[in-house]
């Protein structure tokens, strides 16, 4: 039997990316640090991006946006993950279907006191009842949210905006982390199918000369370069294939 850990790809993160700003003893005693998840997907998708984009694996800067029900962004420099948005648990980072992502940790104590809830109960709310579901009160599924927003539901519209803004901010921060970017890749349920989220991120990166071809961006679930040929940064859609990545790891091991 072979176990392929979803955290493995992120083991190349440097300390500056994985240490938290808390007393070092918690790292020493309990290994409290950022691990990251979706590594199998980030590894497969960044590898495909290098092949499709003709990028040099030893000299490339790729940002992968894995946007599904769970969601994370990663910075892949020269083929290695150097940062990713999920942390010690999948709760950190982007807003997700039902997870809050980043928030002021003091909110836990505040809500726990106001609502008379235990820490476990608040953590459960942050994992299962937050994200776009909690924000909108409609659904964790982006298809429902877009339908509701189009019908005038303000909370659904707001949730979509906050979600997109957070993705764009993470992409921007990883461009700084790598001091540049060659390709930005979208994958997973939302990343592969939803042109709106890709347009939102591209709109925030206009200053870098990112331009999408709207006809290509309207296609769904295909492996495609969706940026215009003159775009300085390539933007791609690459359907993830975690099963194939796990199979390859297994073959390599046995
Ligand atoms: P995953 O976890 O990768 O299977 O992604 C599931 C999520 O992708 C769903 O909850 C939807 O929100 C989103 N999704 C799937 N198909 C579409 C679509 N056609 N348009 C927008 N979002 C979609």
Image: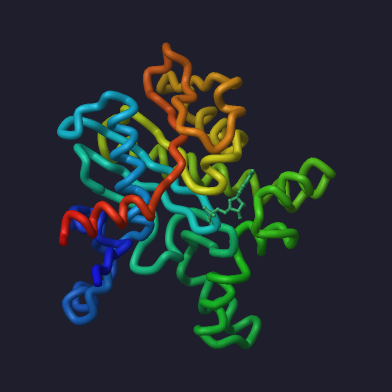
Would residue 114 appear left or right of 169 to someone viewing this image?
right
Would residue 52 appear left or right of 203 to someone viewing this image?
left
Would residue 104 appear left or right of 79 to someone viewing this image?
right
Q: Position of residue 151 (x, y in %)?
A: 84, 44
Whether residue 64 is visible: yes
Task: Report which quarter residue 207 is drawn in.
Answer: top left
Would residue 244 appear left or right of 217 to someone viewing this image?
left
- Give me the residue at 51% from left, 29% from top: 202
Residue situated in front as seen by the camera: 104 or 139: 139
Whether residue 34 is visible: no
Task: Report which quarter residue 138 is drawn in.
Answer: bottom right
- Tell how many labels: 0
Give above or below for 63 relative to 144. Answer: above
Q: In which quarter of the image is the N terminus?
A: bottom left
Q: Where is residue 215 in the image (x, y as percent from the top left)?
A: 60, 20
Q: Position of residue 218 (x, y in %)?
A: 61, 28
Q: In which quarter of the image is the C terminus?
A: bottom left
Q: Which residue lies furthest to the right in this view?
A: 151
């Amino acid at each position: 039997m072979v176990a392929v850990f979803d955290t493995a790809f992120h083991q190349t993160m440097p300390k500056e990316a994985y240490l938290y700003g808390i007393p070092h003893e918690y790292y020493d005693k309990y290994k409290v640090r950022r691990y990251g998840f979706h590594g199998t997907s980030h590894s497969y998708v960044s590898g495909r991006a290098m092949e499709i984009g003709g990028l040099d694996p030893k000299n490339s800067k790729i940002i992968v946006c894995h946007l599904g029900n769970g969601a994370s962004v990663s910075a892949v420099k020269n083929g290695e993950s150097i940062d990713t948005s999920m942390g010690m648990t999948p709760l950190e980072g982007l807003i997700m279907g039902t997870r809050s992502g980043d928030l002021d940790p003091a909110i836990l104590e505040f809500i726990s006191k106001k609502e008379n809830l235990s820490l476990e109960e608040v953590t459960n709310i942050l994992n299962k009842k937050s994200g776009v579901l909690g924000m909108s009160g409609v659904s964790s599924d982006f298809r429902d949210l877009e339908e509701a927003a189009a019908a005038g539901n303000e909370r659904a519209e707001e949730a979509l905006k906050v979600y997109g803004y957070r993705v764009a901010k993470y992409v921007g921060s990883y461009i700084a982390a790598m001091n540049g970017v060659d390709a930005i890749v979208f994958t997973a349920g939302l990343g592969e199918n939803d042109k709106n989220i890709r347009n939102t991120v591209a709109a925030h990166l206009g200053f870098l000369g990112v331009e999408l071809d709207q006809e290509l961006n309207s296609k769904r679930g295909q492996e495609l370069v969706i940026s215009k040929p003159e775009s300085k940064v390539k933007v791609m859609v690459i359907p993830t294939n975690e099963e194939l990545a796990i199979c390859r790891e297994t073959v390599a091991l046995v």
